[in-house]
Image (tube, rainbow, N blue to C red):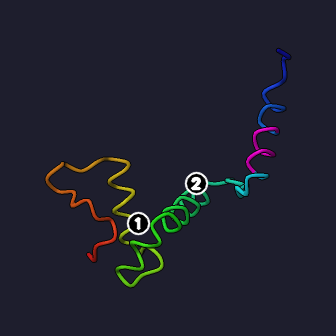
Amino acid sequence: MSIQSEAALEAGLIATLKQMDYEYVQIAEEDNLYANFKSQLEIHNRKRLEEHGRTEFTTEKFGKILIYLEEGLSANSYSGDICRAS
């Protein structure tokens, strides 16, 4: 087993993921991180969003998602449907 630097390992992993059609996204600031996360949620929830006549999360709904993920909600207050109208 050969030894490689962390940078070489990372470069190899990125190259492999790109070959698998993953998109490389440069995250320079926290706002970029949130924008990419919102975009990924919308991509992976497209069908559910369309069922509710939407293509993206509103700013308010995305804010609620972040609050749920960052702080959590009690089991009684989470409905389980992130696409439901507010």
Q: x%, y% of residue 42?
A: 49, 68
Residue neighbourhood size for the residue with mark 1, other residues' Cα within 10 Å, grouped as few (<14), some (14–19), many (≥20)? some
Circle 1 residue: 62
- Find residue 35 and name its label: none
Of badges 1 and 2, nearer the viewer stands: 1
Amino acid at pointer 1: Phe
In the rendered image, which quarter is residue 45 located in? bottom left
Task: Find residue 5 and report its horizontal and vertical position in percent.
Answer: 83, 24
Find the magenta span and give its range.
Answer: 12-17
Does residue 15 belong to the magenta stretch?
yes
Q: Residue at x 73, y 48 (%)?
A: 17
Residue 40 placement (x, y as % from top left): 54, 62
Q: Secondary structure at mark 1?
A: helix
Judge from the rendering whether residue 45 lies leftward or rightward of residue 10; answer left or right: left
Magenta: main secondary structure equals: helix
Q: Is residue 13 above or below residue 68?
A: above
Residue beneath disc 2: 30
Q: Outermost residue, bottom direction?
A: 53
Tag 2 secondary structure: helix
The amino acid beneath tag 2 is: Glu
